[in-house]
Every structure is written in structure tokens, then in C-alpha cells.
Image (cartoon, rainbow, N blue to C red):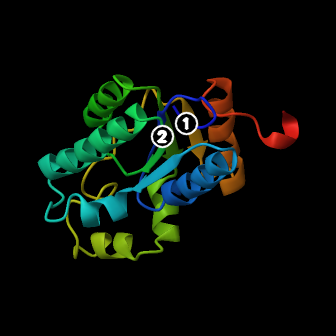
């Protein structure tokens, strides 16, 4: 249990590279911490560097990476943390396995951070889409490797239509509705 008596849970943000997962995830984590929860943020890029170093981008390696993140999220959830994961997680079956694993320990809230490939190419802050479209990177999600849209996400944050703050608001509203996060102090 956390200091507020709330059980642990995992918020899993999935979407294409450049869709806004890290931006939204970071803001959600900061707000949950401000509300008194013990928060752990697992960003896919950071986790890949430390936990999944050496894995490539084959279907099997992507599954292994996501399953490792899911296992860590389940352990943290078990111990009362509010876990925020921001990872592409392109394959639906793998996301469902991770959901089942985490739900053995606590609630799982999937957030589809939705953006078109065209919008992500336009944003392309890391220059990865340009490299993938030029053939310099292969097995790139959304270009020559599929992203399977979730059909069971609790929240869909369309970052083409919504601002980051509006997307964060959707996530927090769902967490409040589910009884996982307390309302902000000013509204209690």
C-alpha cells in the first residue's frame, strides 16, 4: 500500500514512436506523485538501455522487451507503486499477456496514445522515421513493422486532436473514476 492507502496499479501507454507517450507519461507521473502516490516511470527507451540491452527489434526481441517491462511493472504494482509505462508495445497479443501478468497484482489501465504515422513522421524528433523511410533502419514500427491498434484500451488519447495537457487530463480522469488516484487537493 502507498502512503495514501491506494493499492498499486499500472498505467500502460502504448503508441507509435513520436506519438507522445513519454510526454504524457512523465506528466501523469509528476501529477500522481504530487497527489501523494509512490510513482515509478518506466520509459521504453530508458528500460531498453538498462534492462534489455542487446535485444534487437525482431518480433521475438520486441516481445521479450515488453514482457520484461511488464514483469517489472507487476512487481512494482504488487508493492503498491503507481507504475507509469511508456513503451511502443506494438503487438496486441503481447500487450494482453502483460495486462494479465500485471492484473495478478493490481489494476492495469491501458492508454492508447494515438497519432497517425504521418503526424509522427512530421514530429520525428529523433530522426528515426527519416532513417526508416530511407531504408537505413529496418523493422521500424509503423513503417515496415506493424503497430496493432488496441481494441481494449481504457483511454484513447488522440494526440493529433488533443493537447498534451488534455491527454494527461483524460488519463487522470480515468484513474480517478477507477478509484486509483485521489482527486487533486483543491477539489477534495
Relative to residue 170, is residue 168 depicted above or below? below
Image coordinates of residue 48 in percent, x first then y, are 27, 61
Q: Is residue 30 left or right of residue 9?
A: right
- Give the Cα separation between the discs numbered 1 and 2: 7 Å
Identify the residue shown where x is 55% and y is 36%.
2
The image quarter containing residue 157 is top right
Image coordinates of residue 179 in percent, x first then y, are 64, 24
Foreground residue, 22 or 179? Answer: 179
Mark identifier at residue 115: none
- Indicate the secondary structure of the residue bearing disc 2: loop
Q: Earlier in the sequence, mark 1 or mark 2?
A: 1
The image quarter containing residue 79 is top left
The image quarter containing residue 149 is top left
Q: Does residue 163 appear anywhere in the picture?
A: no
**Mark 2 = which residue?**
81
Question: How many callouts does the rendering have?
Answer: 2
**Mark 1 = which residue?**
2
Crowdedness of circle 1 by 10 Å Cα count: few (<14), some, many (20+)? Answer: some
Amino acid at each position: 500500500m502507498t502512503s495514501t492507502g491506494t493499492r498499486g496499479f499500472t498505467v500502460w501507454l502504448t503508441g507509435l514512436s513520436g506519438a507522445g507517450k513519454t510526454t504524457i507519461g512523465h506528466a501523469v507521473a509528476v501529477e500522481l506523485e504530487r497527489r501523494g502516490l509512490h510513482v515509478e516511470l518506466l520509459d521504453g527507451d530508458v528500460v531498453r538501455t538498462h534492462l534489455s540491452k542487446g535485444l534487437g527489434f525482431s518480433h521475438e526481441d520486441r516481445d521479450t522487451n515488453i514482457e520484461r517491462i511488464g514483469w517489472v511493472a507487476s512487481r512494482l504494482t504488487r508493492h503498491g507503486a503507481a507504475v507509469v509505462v511508456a513503451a511502443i508495445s506494438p503487438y496486441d497479443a503481447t500487450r494482453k499477456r502483460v495486462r494479465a501478468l500485471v492484473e495478478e497484482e493490481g489494476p492495469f489501465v491501458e492508454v492508447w496514445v494515438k497519432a497517425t504515422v504521418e503526424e509522427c513522421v512530421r514530429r520525428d524528433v529523433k530522426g528515426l522515421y527519416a532513417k526508416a523511410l530511407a531504408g537505413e533502419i529496418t523493422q521500424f514500427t509503423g513503417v515496415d513493422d506493424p503497430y496493432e491498434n488496441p481494441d481494449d484500451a481504457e483511454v484513447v488519447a488522440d494526440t493529433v486532436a488533443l493537447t498534451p495537457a488534455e491527454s494527461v487530463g483524460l488519463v487522470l480522469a480515468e484513474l480517478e473514476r477507477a478509484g486509483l488516484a485521489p482527486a487533486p487537493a483543491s477539489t477534495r
